[in-house]
Amino acid sequence: MAKVRIVGGSDQEDQFLTQLQNSGILEISSEMTPNTLELLDEYSRKEEAKNFDLILNDLKDAHLFLEKYAPPLGFLKSLVGEKRAVDSEQYKKVLQDYDYNKLVEKCRQLEHEISDLKSKSETINNSIEFFRTWIELDEPVEQIKSTRQVTIEAGIIHNYQSQTDFYPAEVEIISRQQRRALAVIAYPQSAHQQVSENLKDYDFEPVDFSGFQGTPREIVTRLEKQLERTEKRKTEVYDESKQLVEYLDEISILFDHYHNLNQLSEARQRIFHTHYAFVVEGWVKQKDIKKLEKLTQKFQSVQFQLIEPLDNEKPPIVLNNQQPFKPFELVTELYGMPSSKGIDPTILLTPWFALFFALCLTDAAYGILLMILSLVFLTKMRKSKLLWMIFFGGLLTVATGLLTGGIFGDLMRTGSAAEPAYIHNSAVTGFFAKFIWFNPMAAEPKPGSTSPQAMIFFRLTLLLGVLQIFFGMIAGFYVMWKQKKRMDAVLDIGVWMVILVSLLIALFSSQMCVDMSLVEGNSPPLPASAAQPALIVFLIMALVVIVFGARDESNWGFRIFFGILKLIVLSGVFSYMGDIMSYVRIMALGMVTAGIGMAVNTVSFMLAGIKIPVLNWVLFAIIFVGGHLFNLGISALGAFVHTLRLQYVEFFSKFFQGGGKIFTPLEKVSKYVVVKE
């Protein structure tokens, strides 16, 4: 990144900023370097800023309202969020002539009316449902009211018993369902206390008919007519709303236009001004310096020059990787931008991420499906980093699936010699058998082996974990060395690399590695004589960690105490052991994917065997296709998330230095429309 200063005449500021926004190459700094300010006798921020927030909120509300009534885009278009295509003439005409205020007000009015009508319909429906329960009441409801001498009220007796005596009240049961009864109760005012206590025992709930007149049957009839009128008006409002959809393009154009004007207005607030000139500083990519130079040459009073950033100034970060690494920038962006003094981890993580994702799936058919699906969506979203990641992950999944024999679960592989494959064609199964390295779901070990084939998967994931952790430590050593922190590089990383290597040598030269099934066979791969020198090296390096691990502590007591903690717990031996064991989740997810695939095959082929023609194959197709699609979806999601976790927690922690700010140039952004020239 290069920092530049641009100076120009005030009369050309607006035109220059518009061209600058169209180019999208410069990020305007919010602060200016002191040496620039010294060149200005008088300077200020531009105080007048047009507030487009209200306009944008109105346009967005109208857009959301009209979208509800627009014809559906179709599954693919709606999923990728395809933008509306408009020609340049229509775009210019809308900006010049269209008055959006009337449309916004009309949308707001219709939306409020629809909301009111929905609420009214719900209220009427509730009233109809209520009065239908009282339909057997022949008396007008307004007559059910108390006098000075007699209390009359209607209600629901939730615990009604036919032998119950409500004396001195008279009870008329209108309808009854089990122990719930609708009733009208009349009693003298003088007996109010007695009757109330009596009714409480039977869970009496009074009802209110206020606001209504006539019998329940008459009320229901009137309400149904009222509901009919309300629904009719609701349909009319819906039709009016659908007719306004033809103006959706205009609203979309205006939203994008005012959004970009708002961006331009905010950019002006970061520019300094004198009476006759404007001054702006910002960042530009090295490759775009010539573009910026050509742009300024179009304006007679505008010039730019390269300037040195301040010592503590952090330039914005641009991740600039080539295919096939570029899609995996998404992993870095999700975590946070690297520091300008660190390194971009994208190239380092790409092979690991793709491989771990593939091992979590281990099914060649699923890999092919992922590649096809990603390519289909890429026809609409060519720049989608996620889709390209899925494509490359699917490509590698084909390879890991062939190596483990996974093709739609166990469709073409067997769990043992006694279990034939579902595909009986020997030429087909023989062809795929040539690729199989191990079958993690097989009950029988490989010929010449004594341990289950799943242990190969176990050892492979542990090996990959050790390799990636060492890879991360080497990267961390490089970063510190590059930053002139060479003592830190040696003591905090180099010493630990030696410790881990010595512990691994000691482990694989002892019987413990055999007991833990970390190796094939009954004897360790390294000679026993290697253990003693490895342990001596470990003890020497452990002493270094204890003495220098907390070297910033001035008190030697605390220094030794924290040094011991660092050796054992805080980023110590057990921490590294936990990091390495985390990679076993790759095997777990891979075997879960295979296990679910096997279950789907078992159920679907079982249904295919039932003696009901046509139905058996229909059921087979539903279970087989639906089951494997479900397994693909849930397994791919799990593979992505867990692989992401391994990069962030186990890998990035060894070298990544964050805190960088992403490069955000002043540019035109289109949310809803694409202008066709």
Image: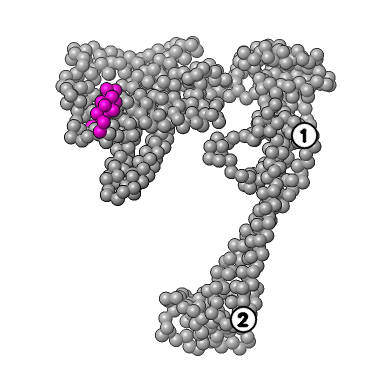
The reply, left or right, for residue 508 in relation to residue 375 is left
Dot in front, 2 or 1: 1
Specify the amino acid type for callout 1: Lys
Q: Picture coordinates of residue 82 (x, y %)?
A: 59, 35
- Give, as a single range, the part of the protein colored magenta: 424-443
Q: Based on the displayed image, in which of its 4 quarters is residue 67 positioned?
A: top right
Quick one: 120 or 569, which is closer to the camera? 120
Q: Give the number of the disc on residue 291.
A: none
Specify the amino acid type for callout 2: Pro
Q: Main secondary structure of the magenta part?
A: loop
Mark 1 nearby-residue class (10 Å; few <14, some 14–19, many ≥20): few
Q: Secondary structure at mark 2?
A: loop
Q: Picture coordinates of residue 416 (x, y %)?
A: 20, 33
Q: Is residue 235 above or below residue 648?
A: below
Quick one: 513 or 332, which is closer to the camera? 332
Q: Which residue is mark 2?
A: 140
| Residue at screen point 71% across, 42% down | 247
| Residue at screen point 72% across, 41% down | 54
**Viewport quadrant of the C terminus:** top right
| Residue at screen point 51% across, 17% down | 322
